[in-house]
Image (spheres, rainbow, N blue to C red):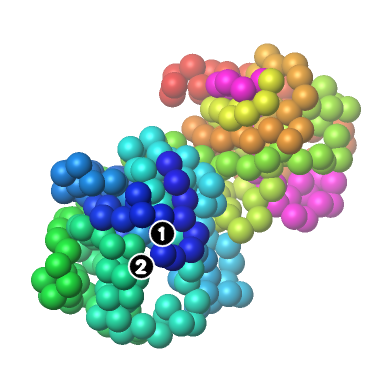
Amino acid sequence: MQRHLQLPVPQGARGAAVAMGNFDGVHRGHQSVIALAAENAQGAPLGIVTFEPHPRSFFAADAPPFRLMNPEARATRLSKLGVEHVFEVPFNADLASLTPRAFCEEILVAGLGISHVVVGADFCFGKGRTGTVETLREEGARFGFGVTIAPLITAAEGAVSSSAIRKALSEGQPQTARDMLGHWHRIEGVVQHGFKRGREMGFPTANIPMEGLHLPAFGVYAVSVDVLDGPHAGAYQGCASLGSRPTFGDHAPNLEIFLLDFEGDLYGATLSTALVAFQRPELKFNGMDALIAQMESDVEEARTLLASHL
């Protein structure tokens, strides 16, 4: 799969049938939009049109991190759906100022040369979000590209949306999030050097920073981990702590992953960690012995949970 950060795009990518949106989380609603784009491709390349940075980041730069996945993790998930091209349109003041018609003419037609576009029923675009799905239909007829509107998808919790998934994760409900995502919520990142306290306690952990990402409920999780590269590439199970390590007075949130029955060095490797089950909230312990005893209990509980959930 190709990621195109600038316009215009290579000739081989023009004429694509595309799904358009932010695709944060690539949830079941996003998947239905992509599936409709694939149905309308008719031999043309299949792509998505999305925006970097996320428009919400542009308009509210000081807001707390909200993204469910970084662009690299999104590209990994999209490739599993058969997407050939990810058109990451730079979102800036110039793009935000385009009228809906100018957006269609300059980005979709002149820039990308699309043949067909699929969007969700609630999609808005253009300056002040004044363009609606009906506007898009009108501009498609004007400029000669097809338009399909995908119906909204619902789950037991209501409409499937990135905001509803964030809420479920914030409440420590990864299985509810999974029902809406259609897959486990994953945190992807490169293993960084930490304080190596876990190793000293007999629980060496792989540390993944959470910078720029939505923070699920702090606490301990049973996890499924894919090591994506390096000599230890493969699938593993584990127990992970997400939080700011109050026992040690640390503050920057990160994900510390202990892989079950694993020996090796993961520094520099890229890990994709699925939050499978929430075990307990983050706690502050009075001493190292109490912390180690709790970690031993957490690991055994994680084994049991993973056996029943995977």
Q: How many marks?
A: 2
Element on which disc 2 rests: helix
Disc assigned to residue 96 = none
Residue 250 located left or right of residue 277: right
- Taking the view exactly as shown, the residue that stands out farthest to the top is 261
Is residue 160 among the parts visible in the rendering? no
Amino acid of disc 2: Gly
Amino acid of disc 1: Val
Q: What stretch is highlighted in magenta?
A: 232-255
Residue contact between numbered discs 2 and 1, judged by CB atoms under 8 Å: yes
Where residue 283 appears, as percent x and y from the top left, is 71, 43
Residue 307 located left or right of residue 253: left
Vertical order, 289 against 75 (above or below): above
Disc with the residue nearer the chain's start (2 vs 1): 1
The structure residue drawn at horizontal position 16% and vertical position 44%, both measured from the top left corner, is 42
The structure residue drawn at horizontal position 17% and vertical position 64%, both measured from the top left corner, is 145
Is residue 229 among the parts visible in the rendering? yes
Disc assigned to residue 111 = 2
**Residue hosting label 1:** 9
Vertical order, 278 against 52 (above or below): above
Instruction: Identify the image quadrant of residue 262.
Output: top right
The structure residue drawn at horizontal position 21% and vertical position 75%, both measured from the top left corner, is 132
Where residue 16 appears, as percent x and y from the top left, is 27, 53
Q: Quadrant of the C terminus?
A: top left
Where residue 151 appears, as percent x and y from the top left, is 16, 56
Q: Is residue 236 in the magenta section?
A: yes
Q: Nearer the viewer, residue 106 or 34?
A: 106
The structure residue drawn at horizontal position 56% and vertical position 35%, both measured from the top left corner, is 272
Q: Is residue 290 in the magenta section?
A: no
